[in-house]
Image (cartoon, rainbow, N blue to C red):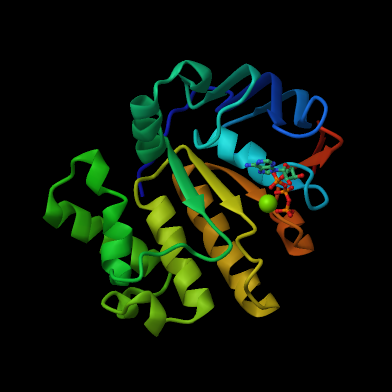
C-alpha cells in the first residue's frame, strides 16, 4: 500500500486548550490549559476514569466539538479558525472515526457503508467501489460486502467501521472505546486489524479506552485527570 498522509512532524498539536461545559458556578472545566503533541504514526491510548474528558478531547480533535481557548492543530489544520463548512471538509478528509457501537448506517450494505466515506472526496463510483472492496478485504470480511449491519456480528460490524475509517487513508484515526462492546477474542482481533492498517498507512491513532489490552499496542499513553493530561511513552 502507498501512503497518502503528510510526513510533517507533529500531526496533533494542542496548546493551552481549555474546554468548559455550562454548569453551576463557573461551569464544568473538562480541559484546563492542556498542551499535548503527537508525532505522525503514534498510537496513543487515551485513559482516565469515566467523565475525565476522553470523548470531549476526541470530539475536539475531530472538529465536532468547539473549545473555549487555546490552539488545536490537526494535520496542519488550525481548528479554532475553521468555519463550520471548513470543519466538515476537514473531517471528511483528515479524520477517521471509530465508535463503540459501530455507528454504521443500517440501510446500507457493508460495502456501501465504507464507500460512503469516499463520497465527499469526489471520487468516481468505480474507484470508490474498488477501494472499499480492497479495504473490506484488508479487514477480512470481503465476503460480507453485500450484508447489511443487522446481518453481521458485532466484531464484523466493527471491522466494517475500521474499513470505513481507513478507506480514505486519513492522517488521524480517533476511536472512542472501540472494543467496549466486544468480547476479549473479538477485541484482540479488532485491535490487531487496526494496528496492522495503522502501520501500513502511517496513520496516527488516538484510542479512548478502559480496555487494558489496548495498552499493549500503544506507543504512548495520555492519562486524563482533573482537567490535565499526563503523557507517558512506552
Ligand atoms: N454536552 C455536554 N454538556 C455538558 N456536560 C457535558 C457534555 N458532554 C460531556 N459533559 C461532561 O463532561 C465531562 C467529560 O465527559 P466525557 O464524555 O468527555 O468523559 P469520558 O472520559 O469520555 O467518560 P466515559 O469514560 O464515561 O466515556 C463529564 O462530566 C460529562 O458529564
Ligand atoms: Mg467517553
Residue, x 35% and y 52% (percent of image)? 167
Left or right: 109 as drawn, with respect to 185: left
- Which part of the image, by quadrant, shows the C terminus? top right
> Do we see residue 219 in this rendering?
no
Q: Where is residue 87 in the image (x, y as percent from the top left)?
A: 41, 29
Identify the residue shown where x is 20% and y is 60%: 129
The answer to which of 85 and 181 lies nearer the viewer is 85
Q: Which of 28 and 195 is in front in this view?
A: 28
Residue 224 drawn at (x, y percent): 80, 39
The single residue placed furthest to the right in the displayed view is: 226
Quarter, ligand 1: top right
Q: Quadrant of residue 226?
A: top right
Above or below, comparing residue 135 to residue 93 in the picture: below
The location of residue 174, given as percent across then percent down, is: 55, 46
Q: Which of 190 and 147 is in front in this view?
A: 147
Along the horizontal axis of the image, is 20 left or right of 67? right
Q: Residue at x 61, y 30 (%)?
A: 39
The picture places residue 165, in percent across and down from the top left corner, at: 43, 52
Amino acid at each position: 500500500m502507498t501512503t497518502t498522509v503528510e510526513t510533517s512532524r507533529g500531526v496533533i498539536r494542542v496548546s493551552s486548550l481549555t474546554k468548559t461545559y455550562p454548569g453551576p458556578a463557573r461551569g464544568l472545566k473538562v480541559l484546563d490549559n492542556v498542551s499535548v503533541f503527537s508525532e505522525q504514526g503514534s498510537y496513543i491510548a487515551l485513559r482516565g476514569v469515566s467523565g475525565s474528558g476522553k470523548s470531549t478531547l476526541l470530539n475536539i480533535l475531530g472538529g465536532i466539538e468547539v473549545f473555549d481557548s487555546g490552539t488545536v492543530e490537526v494535520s496542519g489544520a488550525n481548528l479554532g479558525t475553521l468555519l463550520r463548512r471548513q470543519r466538515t471538509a476537514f473531517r471528511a478528509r483528515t479524520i477517521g472515526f471509530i465508535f463503540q457501537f459501530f455507528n454504521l448506517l443500517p440501510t446500507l450494505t457493508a460495502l456501501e457503508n465504507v464507500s460512503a466515506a469516499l463520497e465527499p472526496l469526489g471520487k468516481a463510483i468505480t474507484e470508490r467501489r474498488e477501494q472499499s472492496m480492497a479495504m473490506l478485504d484488508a479487514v477480512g470480511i470481503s465476503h460480507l460486502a453485500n450484508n447489511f449491519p443487522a446481518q453481521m456480528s458485532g466484531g464484523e460490524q466493527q471491522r466494517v467501521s475500521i474499513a470505513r475509517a481507513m478507506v480514505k487513508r486519513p492522517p488521524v484515526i480517533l476511536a472512542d472505546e472501540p472494543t467496549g462492546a466486544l468480547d476479549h477474542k473479538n477485541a484482540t482481533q479488532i485491535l490487531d486489524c487496526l494496528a496492522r492498517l495503522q502501520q501500513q498507512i502511517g496513520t496516527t491513532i488516538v484510542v479512548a479506552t478502559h480496555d487494558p489490552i489496548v495498552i499493549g499496542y500503544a506507543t504512548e499513553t495520555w492519562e486524563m485527570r482533573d482537567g490535565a493530561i499526563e503523557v507517558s511513552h512506552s
